Amino acid sequence: MFKWFVSSVTDILIAFALATLLLLYGVMSHPEVFPQHFFKYWTVTNPYAAQEATSQQVSAVAQVQR
């Protein structure tokens, strides 16, 4: 009975770990599929923040050049 319980819990943990890895791979490969608020809850590379930072840097450079 105990071996069956340990085996079942181990299988569930492995399934959750693989699902999490698959989700992270999907987020990294295809960020356009996921909604923008998804990145607020997951600490992965946020493509939207990179775009915002780039646009802010460009506007700062444009102001300096004027």
Image: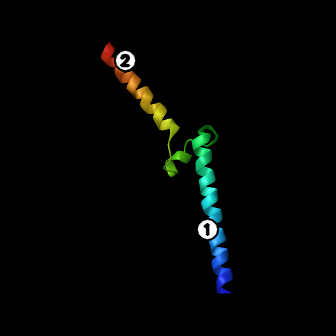
Q: Amino acid at mark 1?
A: Leu
Q: How many discs mark residues in the rendered view?
A: 2
- Toward which corner of the image does residue 10 lie, by quadrant? bottom right
| Image colouring | rainbow
Q: Residue furthest top?
A: 66
* Left or right: 40, with 60 as reference point: right
Q: Amino acid at mark 2?
A: Ala
Q: Residues within 10 Å of mark 1 (few under 14, many from 20)?
A: few
Q: Position of residue 8 (x, y in %)?
A: 67, 75
Q: CA distance from mark 2 to mark 1?
A: 52 Å
Secondary structure at badge 1 equals: helix
Residue at screen point 52% across, 51% down:
42
Q: Establish if 32 lies above or below 40.
A: above
The answer to whether residue 23 is left or right of residue 40 is right
Percent across and percent down for residue 1 are 68, 87
Task: Name the side, left or right, on which 40 lies relative to 57.
Answer: right
Tell me where residue 57 appears, x and y as whole percent: 38, 26
Q: Which image quarter holds the C terminus?
A: top left
Q: Write the residue at 58% across / 50% down.
A: 24
Residue holding disc 2 = 62
The structure residue drawn at horizontal position 57% and vertical position 43%, both measured from the top left corner, is 28
Residue at left 52%, top 37%? 47
**N-term mark: 2 or 1:** 1
Residue beneath label 1, please? Answer: 13
Q: Is residue 45 above or below residue 20?
A: above
The circle drawn on residue 38 is: none
Residue 38 located left or right of residue 52: right
Q: Position of residue 26 (x, y in %)?
A: 62, 46
